[in-house]
Amino acid sequence: MSAEEFNDLPPHLQAELAFEQGHYLHHRIKGWCKIDLYWLHNFYVEIWFLYDLKSVGLVRALTSYTSLDPYADTIKLKLSNSKSKD
């Protein structure tokens, strides 16, 4: 499965795949959200949790290197040669 195929799935299936098959790597805080980073197949996935609702607000596969910038200061990430650099 590619990151693009993952992003085409309904959000509840995206979250289920990330929780069951992904590997938790790290989290960060942005505003009212806790964002968990997972490694799934050969791409990174973010799961955004809303603090007020204690529910998942967004799930997305990261498809560019710049999407990983918020994590660069706190963890080392392996970047695939097949990803775009935008």
Image: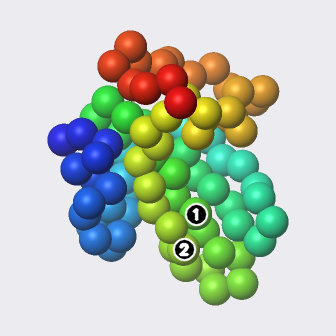
| Residue 69 against residue 83 in the figure, above or below | below
| Residue 82 relative to residue 50: left or right | left
| Residue 44 relative to residue 54: left or right | left
Q: Earlier in the sequence, mark 2 or mark 1?
A: 1
The answer to whether one can see residue 54 in this image is yes
Q: How is the image coloured?
A: rainbow
Outermost residue, bottom side: 53
Query: Label 1: which residue?
Result: 48
Query: Label 2: which residue?
Result: 57
Q: Pointer 2 and pointer 1: residues touching (CB < 8 Å)?
A: yes
How packed mark 2 is, by other alpha carbons closer than 10 Å (few <14, some 14-19, many 20 or more), is some
- Indicate the secondary structure of the residue bearing disc 2: strand
Residue at 25 percent across and 63 percent down: it is 9
Residue at 26 percent across and 60 percent down: it is 8
Q: Please identify the quadrant where the N terminus is shown.
A: top left
Residue at 63 percent across and 56 percent down: it is 35
